[in-house]
Image (tube, grey):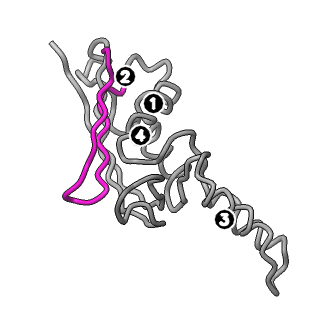
Amino acid sequence: MSITAKRYHDFCAGHRVVGHEGKCRHLHGHNYRVHFEIMADHVQDDLGRVLDFSVIKSKLCEWLEENWDHKFIYWTADTLISNLVIDCKAYDTPISREADENMLEGSFVEVDFNPTAENLAKHLVEVVAPKQLEGLGCTLIKCEIEETRKCSATFYKDSI
């Protein structure tokens, strides 16, 4: 018998898909909705819970808030964005240079993959969740990322 717990979280971020044949090759953003599905090795407590929903919030939803919300996620190999980040840091305005650098600090998130919904979901399952859920006796087995109400991608953990 398997029992899972599910929770979703909304966040906003920008990206572009390098090599995309259509509009997604341009800089754009989404109001993402991420659905987390967690399975435990066994029921975790006397109440019959896999994991309390507040723990999912504190471990995974808050990770999204701190790391991806209102940021621009870009692939290391994307020279357009890499150059933009460098140019933005070098841009001189009447405002002090220190203030400009503080504004940009944390605005860009560099990842080692093309930031498609599929790859973002895979990263959450394979990289983020194991660290965030360590020691809790449960696993993120499925992550669905909606870019819009009509479009989503789902990544399933290979072995449970």
Q: Is residue 105 left or right of residue 3?
A: right
- Per the image, label 3 sits on a secondary structure element best described as helix
Residue that appears at 45% across and 66% down: 26
Closest to the camera, between mark 1 and mark 4, is 4
Q: Amino acid at mark 4?
A: Asn
Q: Earlier in the sequence, mark 3 or mark 2?
A: 3
Q: Upstream in the sequence, badge 1 or badge 4?
A: 4
Q: Secondary structure at mark 1?
A: helix
The residue lying toward the viewer, choosing from 129 and 152, is 152
> Callout 2: helix, strand or loop?
strand
Mark 2 or mark 1, earlier in chain: 1
Instruction: Examine the image and state in which quarter residue 86 appears.
Output: bottom right
Q: Secondary structure at mark 4?
A: helix
Q: CA distance from mark 3 to mark 2?
A: 37 Å
Q: Amino acid at mark 3?
A: Leu
Q: CA distance from mark 4 to mark 2?
A: 18 Å
Disc 1 marks which amino acid? Ala
Residue 15: give x, y in percent of width and height. 48, 58
Residue topped by disc 2: 139
